[in-house]
Image (tube, grey):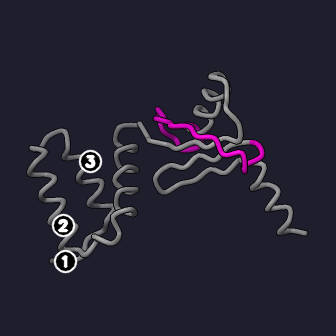
Amino acid sequence: MNRVSKARVARAFVSLWPHAPHTQLVQALAEIIISQHWVHELDQFLDLLAAAYGHQTGRLPVHITTAHALPLAARTEIQKAVQTALQVQHVEADVAVDEKLIGGFVATAPGREIDASVRSSLYSLISYA
């Protein structure tokens, strides 16, 4: 079989999902993954699949890590900033707390990361010193 792009397969899969029988579509995808030897690259392919889904639907799954537990208003503000930065209509966010960030947040989406943490800023200052 000819080599094909993972991103192209991901986009095709997402565009066919609403129209094709799901069992056949998943079987075809499994055959492509095996024939293209992507088994050891599934994490990367799943990120591309999630990104294609987000692009197609305007909804993107995002993991947001904050330095402290946030009130709902602050969480909503961060989600809106992430939506704008990633150019999607809706962010489906799950939030976790990591005190090592000191302040700010890190948003991780398929194939993309926004690091607005104090820890990252401090590391940047140290590297310039």
Q: In this view, does 59 lie above or below 3?
A: above
Looking at the rendered structure, the secondary structure element under dot 3 is helix
What span is colored magenta in the figure?
83-103
What residue would you read off at disc 3?
Answer: 14
- CA neighbours of label 1 inside 10 A, class few (<14), some (14 to 19), many (20+): few
Q: Position of residue 122 (x, y in %)?
A: 82, 57
- Which three-letter amino acid code belongs to the residue tagged 3? Val
Is 28 contained in the magenta span? Answer: no
Q: In this image, 71 relative to 20: left or right?
A: right
Mark 1 or mark 2: which is in front? Answer: 2
Q: How far apart are marks 1 and 3 (CA)?
A: 21 Å
Residue occupying the point 13% across, 45% down: 22
Q: In this image, 60 relative to 95: left or right?
A: left
What residue would you read off at disc 2?
Answer: 32
In primary-sequence order, the first of circles 1 and 3 is 1
Q: How far apart are marks 2 and 3 (CA)?
A: 15 Å
In primary-sequence order, the first of circles 2 and 3 is 3
Residue occupying the point 18% across, 74% down: 35
Screen quadrant of the C terminus: bottom right
- Which three-letter amino acid code belongs to the residue tagged 2? Ile
Looking at the rendered structure, the secondary structure element under dot 1 is loop
